Image: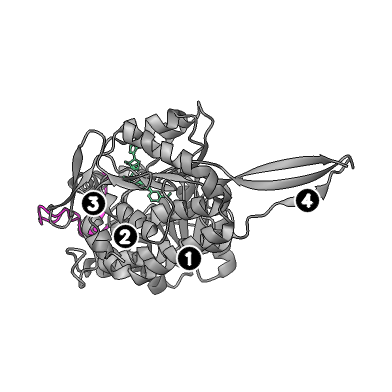
Amino acid sequence: MTAVAETPARDLYVGGAWRPAAAGATFAVHDPATGAQIAAVADAEPADGLAALDAAVAAGPAWAATPARERADLLRAWFDALVAQADELAELITLEMGKPLAEARGEIAYAADFVRWFAEEAVRIDGTAALAADGCAELTTLREPVGPCLLVTPWNFPLAMIARKLAPALAAGCTAVVKPAHQTPLTALATVRMLVELGLPPGVVNVVPSTRAPGLVGALLRDPRLRKLSFTGSTAVGRALLAQAAPNVLRVSMELGGNAPFVVLEDADVEAAVEGALVAKLRNNGEACTAANRFLVAEAVEPRFSARLAERMGDLRIGAGADPETQLGPLIERRAVERVDELVRDAVAAGAEVLTGGAPLDLAPGTFYPPTVLRGAAPSARIWREEIFAPVAPVRAVASDAEAIALANDSEVGLAGYVYGGDLRRALRVARALEVGMVAVNRGVVSNAHAPFGGVKHSGLGREGGREGIDEYLETKFLAVAR
Ligand code: NAD
């Protein structure tokens, strides 16, 4: 099997063939640790996206009719390949996205878990049979694939965000066009290459990297043959795509931005809370939708929590993700560093105290921002209201559980939340009161392939993973049979 890191695939993958973009254009992919160009990738335009949809439509009936066991076997083989090739794939993820190698391996394990889960779910798609309540018919429900899907994914988890969509789509019998983020197309291309080598039939998955996302995605959303959009990315883009999906009444799944509260109650084990905070804040360089964004800490323990968090974050080793000693890599691009710098300055101007970090690291052309702890950030500051997407932790003391809940819920988004507390019943009371889709209690990680991932409010629609994950790719039909 071709080594994934050496994959020569820089072309689009459409209809079972590797080919350049229709207009021959390419775009550069960069290593965020060095700024160096690492690849030139075919830059799909709307015509390429439509060709990919042609292929997905043509392949649809045969894939839907493929026995579930065969679809499951392909997914299981994908899981095995991800495990076997994790080291090479991790190098590729680190190269184009910047996260430390250990994090990249973690992402692969996480993605593989979803792939295995949906391999198992593929053979459990079933319906019901009932005698109608009025006795006039026998009712059978069937679950059928939605049809051709467009999967649009972000750069922060270049493999996992594809796996969380593509695995249930394939399991359900859907075909797909994948539009990865232009910052991280190489992992997407390596992924489809892996699937092709495992026997993926032509047209079932098509990959169209592009720097012209609005035009390409827009053209697909206007095409009535597309039946489903699954998007992971920012709330602003998700909102715009929801509007574009309306004319064709598309099925949609939206995994959008977060602003996770991390609540530490006064009876929490502060050391354990700091350990959890490090994971919840720094996983993926802080560039995770589930990242703890606002630390709300009971005033009795806040000084100790803040001091200890600053000590631990200040000790981390920053560098290129490819260096095995590195604990924190670069941010994805220069704009991200500039943005977090603005957020921190704004918070400081509004009264926050910097306990560690606080200014960009001068490691140009690498795009590094140091772990930063801010104490006393005002809830009106931008850092409190916007998704930080960087290793910056604003901490605020709260006088009561009620104040923590009120501040936590004072956000238009609601993806993840975290609660640390000694008395589990009290911690669960707070967890239940949070307006979010997922809460971790006395843990720094919330997501699990066995559980439904997703948000409420402006964090999205639908769920990925768990028993619910495959429903996003299935329609229910019923047959009424005369008795
Ligand atoms: P983004 O919204 O800028 O881009 C996401 C994807 O949409 C990319 O493929 C991009 O090319 C495409 N895109 C951008 N503008 C578009 C447009 N106008 N029309 C069509 N497509 C367009 O997000 P990003 O910066 O790549 O990722 C970070 C965001 O993703 C954060 O807000 C983060 O919270 C969110 N995210 C959410 C989850 C989740 O599961 N809820 C997971 C990971 C990331």
**Residue depicted at 37% across the width and 48% down the height:** 16
Q: Eyeballing the image, is 446 above or below 217?
A: below
Q: What residue type is labelled 2?
A: Asn
Q: Mark 3 points at which residue?
A: 332
Q: Which of marks 3 and 2 is nearer the N terminus?
A: 2
* Ligand 1: image quarter: top left
Q: Which of marks 1 and 2 is nearer the N terminus?
A: 1
Q: What residue type is labelled 1?
A: Arg
**Residue depicted at 22% across the width and 33% down the height:** 23
Distance (Cα) linking label 2 and label 4: 46 Å
Q: Which residues lie in the magenta part?
A: 350-373
Q: Which of 140 and 391 is in front in this view?
A: 140
Q: Name the residue under label 1.
A: 76
**Residue depicted at 42% across the width and 40% down the height:** 55
What secondary structure is found at the residue carrying circle 4? strand
Residue 227 in sight: yes
Q: Name the residue under label 2.
A: 284
Mark 4 surroundings within 10 Å by alpha-carbon count, few (fewer than 14), some (14 through 19), many (20 or more): few
Is the CB atom of the residue marked by disc 3 within 8 angstroms of ligand 1's nearest atom? yes
Q: Name the residue under label 4.
A: 129
**Residue depicted at 55% across the width and 70% down the height:** 423
Measuring from the top left, give residue 281's x and y in whole percent: 34, 60
Q: Which amino acid does label 3 sit on?
A: Ile
